[in-house]
Structure formats: C-alpha cells, structure tokens
Amino acid sequence: MGEIAPWQRGNVRPDFASASDQEVDRYLKAKVPFKVHCPPRTDVNFTVQGAGVCFMKDQRQAAYIVGQVDQAPVSILVLDKAAWQGPPHHCQEGDYQMVSGVVADNLVVIIGTASEEKLDKLLHAYGSYHEG
C-alpha cells in the first residue's frame, strides 16, 4: 500500500465531523460529482465520526468516511466506479488491512486495523441501506 496517509489511518480530522450516518451521507452527496451511498451503520459495528473530500494523485476526486470498528480506526475511501477495472482486492501492510471492491456506483476502499473479516463486512454493508 505504500506510505499510510492520515485519512487512511482513520486519524485525520474530517472536513465534516458528525456521528450521524445520515448527516455524513447528505454532506458527501453535496460535495462530490458522483453518486455516493450512506455509510455503514452500527449493525456492522461501525461508528461514523465524519467525512471529507480529497484528491488522488491523478486528480480524481474521492470522498472519505472515517470512523471506528470495535475501537479500531477505519477509513472508507469512495470513488466513482469508473475508476476501477479489477476484481475485489485485499492486502495488508503492518497492522493495516485493506479491502476494496465495486459496490453499487462506487469503488470502495476500506483501510483500518480491524480484522479483514470486519472490513469485509463494512465493504458489503456500504450502499445496502435504503436511501430515502
């Protein structure tokens, strides 16, 4: 994975701090030009702490959601699915696990110190909530 950026470690101060998944959802939908979905909720032990927008090295815009799973910091990076051409991916560097895959309209990359199994649950929970 290379150097771990603060948003990847889950310890960045988000542009928008909130413990509400619905507020984070509304914030991101207003900030990025591609469709995003409501972040995972507490039924997969995810506690949202906020969100923001960043740019990748190739200048593609990405949304990120920060929070915790069982007290372990987790970051969820969300890009337009057009940015991804491969199968779901898993890797580990040091204490950090990464899982990624295409979910709904997005490429979703989840990084954290939680177990791969818990990060996989977050990946599958992303975009699975009814959007009102």
Image: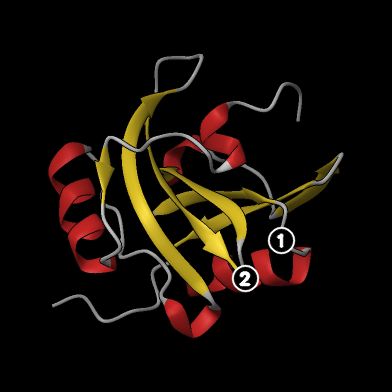
Task: Determine the secondary structure under disc 2.
Answer: loop
Q: Mark 1 points at which residue?
A: 114
Residue pictured at 40% horizontal, 15% vertical: 59
Name the side, left or right, on which 89 lies relative to 66: right
* Image location (x, y in percent) of residue 50: 33, 50
Residue pictured at 51% horizontal, 14% vertical: 57
* Image location (x, y in percent) of residue 7: 51, 34
Residue pictured at 59% horizontal, 66% vertical: 69
Name the side, left or right, on which 81 lies relative to 69: left
Residue contact at pointers 2 and 1, CB within 8 angstroms:
yes
Quarter of the rendering containing residue 26: bottom left
Q: Mark 2 points at which residue?
A: 70
User: Label 1: how many residues lie within 10 Å, few (<14), some (14-19) or many (20+)?
Assistant: some
* Image location (x, y in percent) of residue 31: 18, 38
Q: Is residue 77 above or below residue 122?
A: above
* Image location (x, y in percent) of residue 89: 73, 50
Q: Which amino acid does label 1 sit on?
A: Ala
